[in-house]
Image (tube, helix red, strand yellow):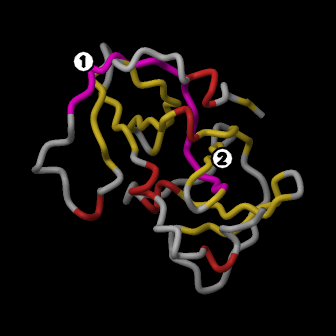
Amino acid sequence: MARFESASETAALPSGEEHVVIFKLGEEYYALDIQAVQEIVRMQTITSIPGADFWVEGITNLRGRVVPVIDLRKRCGVPAGDYTSETRIVVVSSATGMVGLIVDAVSEVMRIPADQVEPPSAIVTVPENSYLRGVAKLEDRLVSLVDLDGVLPAPAEDYAGYSRAA
């Protein structure tokens, strides 16, 4: 299990930087703002929820809290693969509460200068990928920056009653 700096610790970052957790879905790299990430855990038992959206894997018990878990590959339209020893659940805090995001692997935590980030092209901006908020141009690869609010349903939607656990 990995824990990350709190929002107060990252508040001192220069405004010209993105502080992100980089992960893989399939062969591509994506990143989430580190302030949304609570922890990263190994894959664990998930209980399915009948009638949930196809990308909702189910719920899991995370130290006594019931947390909904989303397969980010399915949610983002990336072809699904088998879970491996590198598969992780990235636990994030959002307007809907705590949510686990299944990713293929977590690779690193990084600060990306703002001048290396471009908004997504209008050609690739369609409703199906409204989660894409930018692309970081790193020396060795491109990293898609994920907007957590675009990935998760609005707070009014309820993950089968489990999103508002205290």
Magenta-tinted stretch? 98-118
Relative to 88, 10 lies left or right = left
Work out whether residue 81 or residue 10 is closer to the camera in this orientation and state it.
10
Residue at mark 2: 91
Residue at mark 1: 115
SS for tag 2? strand
Per the image, is 61 magenta? no
Judge depth for marks 1 and 2 and give the one in front. 1
Amino acid beneath label 1: Asp
Q: Residue at image x 52%, y 76%?
A: 157
State the image coordinates of residue 21 (x, y, percent, origin top left): 53, 30
Mark 1 closeness class: few <14, some 14–19, many ≥20 residues within 10 Å = few
State the image coordinates of residue 3 (x, y, percent, origin top left): 73, 30
Q: Residue at image x 48%, y 28%?
A: 20
Spatial separation of the CA atoms under disc 1 and disc 2 = 28 Å
Relative to 137, 27 lies left or right = right
Q: Residue at image x 89%, y 57%?
A: 64
Q: State the predominant SS element of the stretch in magenta.
A: strand
Amino acid beneath label 2: Val
